[in-house]
Amino acid sequence: MAGYGVQLWPILQDVHQLRATYGQRAGTFLSNAGVLQVFGVNDHDSARLVSDLLGQETVVFQTMSRALDAEKTGITYGEQHTARPLLTPDEVRNLPQNVELLFLAGQRPIVAGKLAYYADSEFRGLYDAP
């Protein structure tokens, strides 16, 4: 469709709907999207997909060990590096209602605030009241 200047903005409820509609091509659908906007995730499979898309960070832990017998009184300090998801699936499901995640092709994920159109006077009268 890009060759015709057409851009789609599909709206999906969850990853299950995407897989039911596109089957094995669901991954291609996501990987070809220029923008992926995510909010209000309620199911574990969708939350796990979003967590995977976000990627991981390296967390550094400080460690200390001490000899237990009386002859060895030395204390050893060290660091442990471990990977952790930027957001776990549980954290994705528990994001506040006013937060959304944006995935733009070629950029790092963005945590953004959702516009509450119904609370903005600029949009008053342009929508049906909630």
Image (cartoon, rainbow, N blue to C red):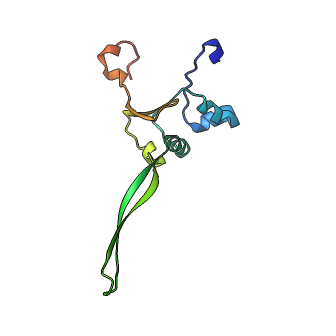
Q: Where is residue 46 in the image (x, y as percent from the top left)?
A: 54, 41
Q: Where is residue 102 in the image (x, y as percent from the top left)?
A: 46, 31
Depth check: 73 or 119 in front?
A: 73
Q: Which residue lies furthest to the right in this view?
A: 24
Depth check: 69 or 38 in front?
A: 69
Quadrant location, the C terminus: top left
Quarter of the image where one finds residue 6: top right
**88 relative to 123 in the view: left or right:** right
Q: Position of residue 122 (x, y in %)?
A: 32, 14
Depth check: 105 or 13 in front?
A: 105
Residue under the image location 52 percent in, 40 percent down: 53
Q: Tell me: residue 29, above or below residue 122.
A: below
Quarter of the image where one finds residue 18: top right
Residue under the image location 36 percent in, 21 percent down: 117
Q: Tell me: residue 79, above or below residue 53.
A: below
Residue under the image location 56 percent in, 44 percent down: 45
Count of numbered circles on the image: 0
Residue under the image location 38 percent in, 34 percent down: 99
Q: Tell me: residue 88, above or below residue 100.
A: below
Quadrant location, the N terminus: top right
**70 relative to 27 in the view: left or right:** left
Q: Where is residue 61 in the image (x, y as percent from the top left)?
A: 37, 59
